[in-house]
Image: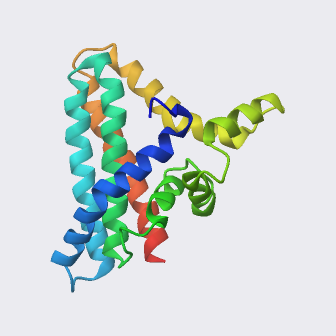
Amino acid sequence: MRAQPDRAPELIALAAAERLAPGAERWAAEHAGEPPEKLARRAVKRHVRVSRLEGATAGLAGALGIAPDLVALAWVECRMVFHVAASFGFDPHHPMRPAEMLALQGVYPTAQEAREGLDGAGRHMAIAYAEGKVAGGDAKLRSRLLKMVGERVAHRAAAKVIPGVASPINAIQNGNAVAELGEKAIRFYGG
């Protein structure tokens, strides 16, 4: 990622696909025969719990926990999306899974645009943002960038100045973020 920081979201998505697809596939196989939506909701519930625990733990580190919390939260969200997709019978190894994940997270407006970004054919998010700035601004792209990093950091940074408050706030915020993404994923994969 250091060599291509403008492609960080794409690189994270590809790494997540490589590392998380086998586990999602195994998990779906172990629960074969269960109704897909029930299985997907179980996956979301499980990942909401994990994200709350992770957020509470990261909150104990104070301001030093902001960056690790964001990385861990992104990883939990990725893992959940792969599990939800597998719950509905989608192959977690398929090349569209990381693209769909980026679209569900709001990094790209569509999975097709995300796939083009992953393949290097589309505009990278940072380049598109810079071009929009020069041309007078791409409000949607700027909004997605703020949603992806800015708002999360801003909300958590405010809580970090009050010792003892950051941990429960992180836990709630992480749980809510994962639950919201989980509902989007269930609607996307469940039809």
Q: Please state if 77 lies on the left or on the right of 154 as rendered.
A: left
The relative height of residue 167 versus residue 50 in the rendered view (above or below) is above
| Residue 152 quadrant | top left
Comparing 175 with 133, the one in front is 133
* Picture quarter with the N terminus: top left
The relative height of residue 81 versus residue 91 in the rendered view (above or below) is above
Residue drawn at 57 percent across, 55 percent down: 119
* Figure disc tally: 0
Residue drawn at 44 percent across, 64 percent down: 97
| Residue 17 quadrant | bottom left
Q: Please state if 144 lies on the left or on the right of 46 as rendered.
A: right
Which residue lies most toward the right here? 135
Which residue lies most toward the bottom here? 33
Q: Please state if 14 lies on the left or on the right of 103 as rendered.
A: left
Q: Please state if 126 lies on the left or on the right of 165 as rendered.
A: right
The relative height of residue 181 versus residue 161 in the rendered view (above or below) is below
Whole-percent x, y for residue 110 in the image: 61, 60
Residue drawn at 21 percent across, 47 percent down: 50
Whole-percent x, y for residue 61 in the image: 23, 20
Which residue lies most toward the front here? 3
Residue drawn at 47 percent across, 69 percent down: 187
Whole-percent x, y for residue 93 in the image: 36, 68
Comparing 82 with 66, the one in front is 82
